Amino acid sequence: MSGKPKLHYFNGRGRMESIRWLLAAAGVEVCLYGSLLFQQVPMVEIDGMKMVQTRAIGNYIAMKYNLYGKDLKERALIDMYVEAVIDLNELLMTHILQPADKKEQHLATIVDKATNRYFPVYEKVLKDHGQDFLVGNHFSRADVQLLETLLMVEEIKPDILAKFPLLQSFKARISNIPTIKKFLQPGSQRKPPLQEKDLPKVMKIFH
Amino acid sequence: MAGKPKLHYTKGRGKMESIRWLLAAAGVEFEEEFIETKEDLEKLRNDGVLMFQQVPMVEIDGMKMVQTRAILSYIAAKYNLYGKDLKERAWIDMYVEGTTDLMGMIMYLPFQPADTKEKNLALIIERATTRYFPVYEKALKDHGHDYLVGNKLSWADIHLLEAILMAEECKPDILSAFPLLQAFKGRTSNIPTIKKFLQPGSQRKPPTDEKFVAIVRKIFNI
């Protein structure tokens, strides 16, 4: 198994999921590891480094597998789009941590931000250039991370893309890219949403 | 004055301060337009210049860039502060993420409820001295160079200096167990562009006090 990136995390989505998506989209086979505890995870053993920090890992993978645009300006756009998606992902990740009496309000916030702040931007980007991918008419990390987030938001509100026809076709199109299609099938390394019953176990790991 | 980057933010540090540091260290002159009221923020939003309705926003090279990390990465790459290859970039990214986490904790401190301040301050000091600073101290020890990555000034060094100074504002002797970081601080502070930024009258912003917290809460409705 030497040479393949090795992922250290618990067996859930958390901050590692975006990295799994990127590696899968780039067609990179990974070596599975169980749950390991370090001062901080995610940790990915790749190319002789023990990389930590989600963004650093994501940047490295994106650059290495040519998913980061062709120049500085494309990278800037990709970064802007990805950072916003990360913000929305953070909201989603913290949803399960909300106390029962705050959950509904939190869900409303997620839906509001998704439909009023974030999705309109991506819908407009696709409308303005009419191309298949967000940046540079070329598949990039921005497309991967946006698809990941679209699917996660749909898990909590299935009709969330009702007002975004271009995002709907984007979702279908990107989902059909062979490496991504494979990742979306059962048996892949994609992780399911965290269940309430597993929350105490995860909390114990990260206290 | 076409050509100078223009920063849109409040008059405080917040998420824009690291951007000010990086531009200053790179020797890049920049302009600032301050958001002083809720109406100022609304105007920016209504003008459609904030991609996700948020600041920081930096007008640079014909773009209206948003998202702090995106802006910093662009500046670092443009001014050759991002390493010479992919692996150096990886190290710089890892180091910067660590200092970002630490400075994030410090940034939010003035906004925490009064009864949690002491506990949060203690956590900041603990994290700084047991999780973050040891990593940078060891990096400097292992290679014995003046800079964190590639024996050359990079974004990682500038960001670390900013974090050290912020941490010292929380606890003046916080570097007592880290001799190499002390030397690093002395050395890096003496780089001419950074030395200039550290002098009174520069665009560096002061720590956030209670009065400013009230202003920020009003502007952002938090």
Image: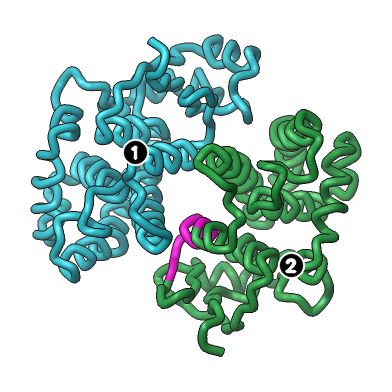
Chain colours: A green, B cyan
Q: What stretch is highlighted in magenta?
A: A51-59
Q: Which chain does the residue under circle 1 lie in?
A: B
B49 and B114: which is toward the camera: B49
**Residue at x 39%, y 25% (from the top left corner):** B213
Asked if one can make out residue A98 in the rendered structure from this viewpoint, the answer is no
Please check the rendered image and state whether residue A70 is part of the magenta-colored stretch, yes or no. no
- What secondary structure predominates along the stretch shown in magenta? helix
Give left or right: position of A34 versus B74. right
**Residue at x 65%, y 48% (from the top left corner):** A142
Outermost residue to the bottom: A1
From the top left corner, tell me how far across and down residue B167 is, in percent.
Answer: 24, 45
From the top left corner, tell me how far across and down residue A59 is, in percent.
Answer: 51, 56
B208 and B162: which is toward the camera: B162
Report the quarter where the N terminus of chain B lies: top left
Give left or right: position of A68 versus B213. right
For disc 2, the marked residue is A195
Q: In this view, does B113 lie above or below B201?
A: below
SS for callout 2: loop
Q: Which chain does the residue under circle 2 lie in?
A: A
From the top left corner, tell me how far across and down residue A88 is, in percent.
Answer: 65, 45
Circle 1: is it few (<14), some (14-19), or many (20+) Cα within 10 Å?
some
Give left or right: position of B55 versus A200. left
Q: Which mark is residue B21?
A: none
Q: Tell me, yes or no, whether the two marked residues, 2 and 1, touch with CB atoms within 8 Å.
A: no
Give the distance between the C-alpha atoms of the residues marked 2 and 1, in whole angstroms: 46 Å
**Residue at x 73%, y 40% (from the top left corner):** A105
For disc 1, the marked residue is B79
